[in-house]
Image: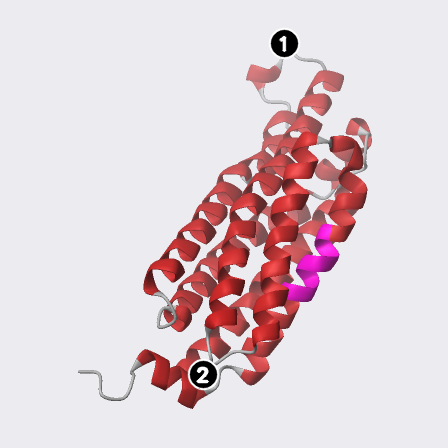
Amino acid sequence: MGKRKARAAGAFYLITVLLGLFAEIVVRGNVIVSGDSAATARNILASEGLYRLGFVADIAGGAAYVVVTLLLYELLKPVSKSLSRLAAAFSLIGVAVGAVFSLAHLAPLLLLKSAPYLAPFDAAHLQAMAYLSIKLHALGYDIALVFFGIYEALLGYLIFRSTFLPRALGVLVAIAGFSFLGGSLTIFLSPAGAGVVSTVMLALDGAGELSLMLWLLVMGVDERKWENTAHPPGAS
C-alpha cells in the first residue's frame, strides 16, 4: 500500500512539473517580451489559443499538486499526523494562492480584446495594464512559493524522520523549502537582486523536488518499514 501511494504521488508530481514547464517556458517564455508591453500584447493576441492553454496548464498543474499533497500526507502521516497535516495545509494554501493569481494570466485577454467598456482607454494604456497583469501573476507565484517553501521544509523534516525514505532525500527537500522561503523574501525586500536569487532558488529547488519526484516514481518506499511505522507490531 505504501509503495503504491508513493508511486502515485511521483506520477502526479511528474504531471505537475510537466504542466508547469509548459505554462512557464512554452507559453509565457515565448509570448512575454521583458519590458515591452506592446510586443507582449501583439504576441498574446497572435497566439491566443496557446496563451489560454497556459492558463489551463496552470489550473491542471495545481489540481495535480493537490493530489500529490494528499498522497504525501497519507504516506507521511505515520511519522507525525499533526505535522503532516500542518504541512499539507501550507501546500493547499499555496495552491489556492496560485489559483487566484492565475486570473491575472487571463486578464490581458480581457484588456486587449477591444470591448466597448474599454473605449475610454487608448491602446498604449491597455497594453500597459495587460503587462501589469502579467507582472502581478508573477508576484502571486512568488507569494505562493512562501507557503510551498514552508511545506517543503516540513516535508523534508518528515522524510528525514521516517525510516522508509532516505534521510538524504529529506535534507534535499528541506533545503529546497528554505531556498523558496529565502528567495521569495529576498525578492520582496530587494527586487534588484531578483535575477541571481531566482537562479540559485531554482537550482536548489530542482535538486530537492526532482530527487523526491524520481525517488517516489522509481523506488517508492521501503514497504516493510512503512507498514511497521503505520501499523506497529502489537498495536491494537
Determine whether 44 is above or below 126 in the image: below
- Mark 1, Cα crowd under 10 Å, few <14 / some 14-19 / many 20+, is few
**Disc on the earlier residue, 2 or 1:** 2
Q: Which residue is mark 1?
A: 120
Q: Is residue 14 visible?
A: no
Along the horizontal axis of the image, is 160 left or right of 195?
left
Determine whether 204 is above or below 162 in the image: above
Image spot of residue 64 (x, y percent): 49, 61
Along the horizontal axis of the image, is 77 left or right of 7?
left
Q: Residue at x 72, y 24 (%)?
A: 127
Q: Residue furthest left?
A: 236
Q: Quadrant of residue 182?
A: top right
Image spot of residue 169 (x, y percent): 60, 72
Q: Residue at x 40, y 63 (%)?
A: 70
Nearest the eye: 5 or 46: 5
Determine whether 89 is above or below 126 in the image: below
Residue at mark 2 to residue at mark 1: CA–CA distance = 60 Å
Nearest the eye: 218 or 134: 218
Q: Residue at x 77, y 28 (%)?
A: 37
Q: Residue at x 63, y 59 (%)?
A: 175
Q: Which residue is mark 2?
A: 3
The residues colored magenta run 201-209
Image spot of residue 1 (x, y percent): 37, 83
Q: Is-magenta flag for residue 52?
A: no
Determine whether 159 is above or below 193 in the image: below
- State whether the magenta stretch is mostly helix, strand or loop: helix
Q: Is-magenta flag for residue 207?
A: yes
Q: Quadrant of the C terminus?
A: bottom left
Mark 1 belongs to which amino acid? Pro
Labels in figure, total: 2
Q: Quadrant of residue 14?
A: bottom right
